[in-house]
Amino acid sequence: MFDTILTIVLVVVTISILLSSIRAFIGPTISDRIVALDTVGLLLISFIGMLMMVQDTHAYTDVIIVVAIIAFVSSVSIALFIERRDLFERD
């Protein structure tokens, strides 16, 4: 029963990743694109976590940590770019 629920949730998360990716490509504003890309990162982390539960392994833990760090750093750097329109401070 648990495997069936996990399979259904994996399909739903996959559809959510697809829809968020579409929003990231056709988003009318840059804010919509940033939120969509951040959502894709979080959904990817949850997808890998559920895949670990389906396969009953801890092999992808490092992948989850790397994806989370990359998603966080990219969100912060894009927010900084939007705020100042410049990533590097020039004196």
Image: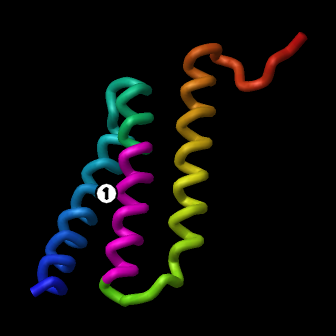
Quadrant into which the C terminus falls: top right
Q: Is residue 45 magenta?
A: yes
Give coordinates of residue 10: x percent, y percent. Answer: 24, 72
Q: Secondary structure at mark 1?
A: helix
Q: Which residue is the extreme one toward the left?
A: 1
**Left-right relation of 35 to 71:** left
- For label 1, the crowd category at 10 Å Cα-Cα, with few meaning under 14, some 14 to 19 and many 20 or more, is many
Residue 37 in magenta?
Answer: no
Image quarter where the N terminus lies is bottom left
Main SS category, magenta section: helix
Q: Residue at x 56, y 20 (%)?
A: 82
Residues rendered magenta in the picture: 38-53
Instruction: Judge whether 46 appears above or below 31 on screen.
Output: below
| Residue found 36% across the figure and 41% down from its top | 36
Q: Label 1: which residue?
A: 17
Left or right: where 82 falls relative to 13: right
Q: Residue furthest right?
A: 91
48 up-or-down from 54: above or below: above
Q: Is residue 1 visible?
A: yes
- Residue 74 position within the rendered picture, expressed as x and y whole percent measured from the top left: 58, 41
Q: Quadrant of residue 80?
A: top right
Of residues 51 and 19, the one nearer the viewer is 51
Q: Quadrant of residue 76?
A: top right
- The residue shown at (33%, 26%) is 28
The residue lying furthest to the top in this view is 91
Q: Position of residue 51 (x, y in %)?
A: 35, 78
Q: Is residue 25 visible?
A: no
| Nearer-the-camera pick, 79 or 49 | 49
Amino acid type at circle 1 is: Ile
